[in-house]
Structures are given as C-alpha cells and as structure tokens.
Amino acid sequence: MDPKELNIIEHLEEVRKRLLYIIGSFLTLLALSLFFVEQIYSLLVKGLDVKLALLGPSDVLWIYFKIGAVCAIAFTLPIAGYHIWKFVLPALKPHERRGALLFIPSLFLLFIGGISFGYFVVFPIVLSFMQDLAGAHFIQFYTSQNYFSFLIRLTLPFGILFELPAIVLFLTSFGLLKPHILKKSRKIAYFIIAVTSILLTPPDFISDILVLIPLLFIYEISINVSAFVYRKKLQKEADLQEMGLSS
C-alpha cells in the first residue's frame, strides 16, 4: 500500500477512535444528568411565580431529556476539546502546544459563561417583558414544554456562540487563522451574527437585540484574541530563528 494512503487510513482510524470517545462520554454524562435531572429541574424553576403544567404524560420525559442533554453537552465540551487537541498535537510545534492547550478549559468555561449570561441576564429580562406585555388582559398559563423550549432557545445560543474566542484561539495557534482575516470579514460576520440571533431566538425584537449586542462584542474579543496569539506566535518563531542562527 502507498505510504500516503496508509497515512490517511491511520488518520481516519484516529478520528474514528476520538469520535467514539467523545460520543461515549456524552452518553455517559447524559445518563448521569438524567439521574440528577429532578434536582436540576427544581433549581431551574426555583423562584418562578407560576406553576408549570403538563399537557400529556410524555411531556415530562421530553423536558427531562432536554435538560439532561444540555448538561451533558456542557460537560462533554472539555472532553471533546482534549481529544481534538490530542489529534492535532503531532502537527503542532512545541511553542504552539501550550496555546492550543488553553482550548480545552476555554470551551467549557465559555459555554458555561454563555449559558449563565443567557439564563441570569437575558432570560429574566425577556420573561418579565413578556409578562408585562400580557398584563391583566390574559391568563398567564405556562406549560413545562413551552417554558423550557423558550428557556433553552434563549440561553443555548449564548453557550454555543460564546465558544467563538476559544475556536479562534485554537485556529490561530494552529496557523489556520490570522487576525486580519477576521477584520476583513467583519461586515459579513456581523450580518451572519444578526441572522443567527434572529433565527435562534424567540420571535420578538427585544430578544434579538439582547442576543445580537453581546455576540457582536464576542466577535470583537475574538479579533483581539487572534491578534494576541498571532503576535505571540510570530515572536516565538522569530526567537527560534535567532537561536538557530546564533547556534
């Protein structure tokens, strides 16, 4: 067999192994989350003024599964980051490995930060606005499925999109992205972020704005992260060249 073909097969086998680890971790964490899902549910509805209703016997299973899946995703992210890092590790230079290693905790912390921002800041504002809008004209009757669908749709995009700085850090460390590309793509990125915020949030103007503004801010942070990592990368390469010339 040709060495190149053999190398490709080895890489595919490595990808398959890493994916199996990630999927297995997710399923294990999903089972663990479902074991504690009632306690998680109690925390999420704590302080809610109204009692949530079920419209069918199977609704509670779907709600618990949604909550468990979000928790499992959150704790699978650093595991996935680790396996991605291990996969690309042989291709990284020694001075690039430390920067790429930051990718692992960053994935988890940014996801949790995004979910927390959505849940503790954006969600109460939007929910209060909706309740005030309904006022005394309507009986405010919430089903558990609608409530948690609304909650997840409003908070999960923050968890996912807050990952952008970590992804940018990783790609810049690996040499696949440069800060000037992000700067040149700013207008297109703003448009994509605006469309994404509209598609992923409930159909109201307040939700769109509350999601859009932080995401634009996150994009600007990503540009600065990329510029910082890129400067460090160039400096390290220049230092290594000087050491090579001096020796």
Image: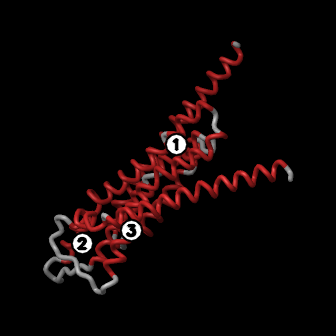
Q: Secondary structure at mark 3?
A: loop
Give the residue number, with chain letter if any, for mark 3.
201
Q: Determine whether 75 is above or below 197 in the image.
A: above
Q: Residue furthest top?
A: 246
Q: Residue at x 47, y 46 (%)?
A: 165
- Percent x, y of residue 221: 44, 44
Image position, residue 237 (x, y; %): 63, 27
**Helix, strand or loop at mark 1:** helix
Q: Nearer the viewer, mark 3 or mark 1?
A: 1
The Cα–Cα distance between marks 2 and 1, rounded to whole angstroms, is 38 Å
Query: Any mark on residue 151, and which?
Result: none
Which amino acid type is marked by label 3? Answer: Thr
Q: As shown in the figure, which amino acid type bears the numbered disc 2?
A: Met
Q: Nearer the viewer, residue 124 or 89?
A: 89
Looking at the image, which residue is at 57% across and 41% down? Answer: 172
Please name the residue that numbered disc 1 is placed on.
Answer: 169
The crowd level at tag 2 (other Cα within 10 Å; few <14, some 14-19, many 20+) is some
Horizontal side of 94 relative to 62 (left or right) equals: right
Colouring style: secondary structure
Q: Please report contact status of discs 2 and 1: CB closer than 8 Å, yes or no.
A: no
Calculate the distance from the C-alpha at mark 3 to the C-alpha at mark 1.
Answer: 27 Å
Q: Position of residue 180 (x, y in %)?
A: 58, 42
Between marks 2 and 1 in the image, the one whose residue lies nearer the viewer: 1
Q: What kind of residue is marked 1?
A: Leu
Of marks 3 and 2, which one's residue comes earlier in the chain? 2
Residue topped by disc 2? 130
